[in-house]
Image: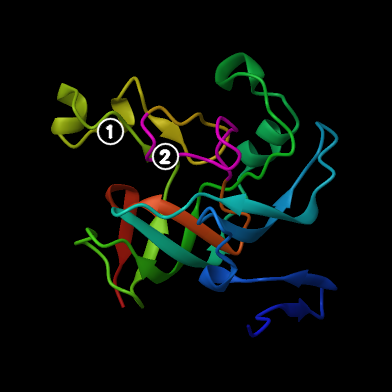
Amino acid sequence: AMDTSVVDVELGIEAKPGLESLDTDGSIDVLCLACDSAAGDFTVRSMRRRTPNPHDVVIDMKYCGVCHSDLHFAAGQMAGVTGAVEYPMCPGHELAGIVKAVGAEVTRFRVGDQIGVGCMIDSCGTCARCEAGEEQKCASQVATYGGKDKSGRAAQVPAGRQTLGGYTDTFVVNERFGIKIPD
């Protein structure tokens, strides 16, 4: 079998980018900028994204805003609001990239589309607020980073870990929480 590894010369890290790096369980090896403690000691590291589901979009990340809340969350300063931070953690909730793969049941995106993701990646989908298109008011919403999966649509690797944000080279999200960016 051909080795699809590449070495990022700038970072000096060996990586298996994108879908070429599907593990035997279907999860995806990705590079993240993450920290190990409230000291904010961000380093580039290899982490894993979940196996893409039928309604998922896989994003080749191009941009991610750096918001003050990312840094406060990483430092554990929002624990009274969001709960305790689980390290290592990867923030980022202002994402933009290019769709590089879509699940079999995705209808809103195609490979090559420009896509954005905001501050949440899931909700219950069935409450009155969700049905009215106001998922941001759902009591079961899942934050783009630091959230906990409640339905399987925002599952993480390993199971049960907090969601990983957009300081990464690849992001997986349910199509309902992707925003099409016009050409």
Tell me if label 1 and label 2 are in contact, CB under 8 Å: yes
Q: Residues within 10 Å of mark 2 (few under 14, many from 20)?
A: many
Which is more N-terminal, label 2 or label 1? 2
Residue 8 is situated, as x and y percent measured from the top left of the image, at: 77, 77
Residue 98 counted in the magenta span = no
Q: Residue 64 lies in what quarter of the image?
A: bottom right
Report the residue marked by disc 2: 120
Residue drawn at (24%, 60%), measured in percent from left and top?
106
Residue 135's tag is 1
Q: Is residue 97 above or below residue 50?
A: below
Amino acid tagged 2: Met
Say which amino acid is labelled 1. Answer: Glu
- Residue 153 highlighted magenta (yes or no): yes
Measured as percent of width and height from the top left, residue 45 is found at 76, 55
Residue at horizontal 36 percent and vertical 37 percent from the top? 122
What SS does tag 2 mark? Answer: strand
Q: Nearer the viewer, residue 69 or 106?
A: 106
- Residue 8 or 177: which is nearer the viewer? 8
Disc 1 crowd rating (10 Å Cα; few below 14, some 14-19, many 20+) is many
The quarter in which the N terminus is drawn is bottom right
Name the residue rendered at 60%, 64% in the picture.
169
Q: CA distance from mark 1 to mark 2?
A: 9 Å
Q: How many marks?
A: 2
Closest to the observer, 135 or 15: 15
* Corner quadrant of residue 133: top left
| 137 horizontally vs 23: left or right | left
Relative image position of residue 34 (x, y in whole percent): 73, 47
- Mark 1 lies on a secondary structure that is helix
Q: Quadrant of the C terminus?
A: bottom left
Q: The magenta stretch spans which residues?
A: 151-164
Magenta stretch, overall SS: loop
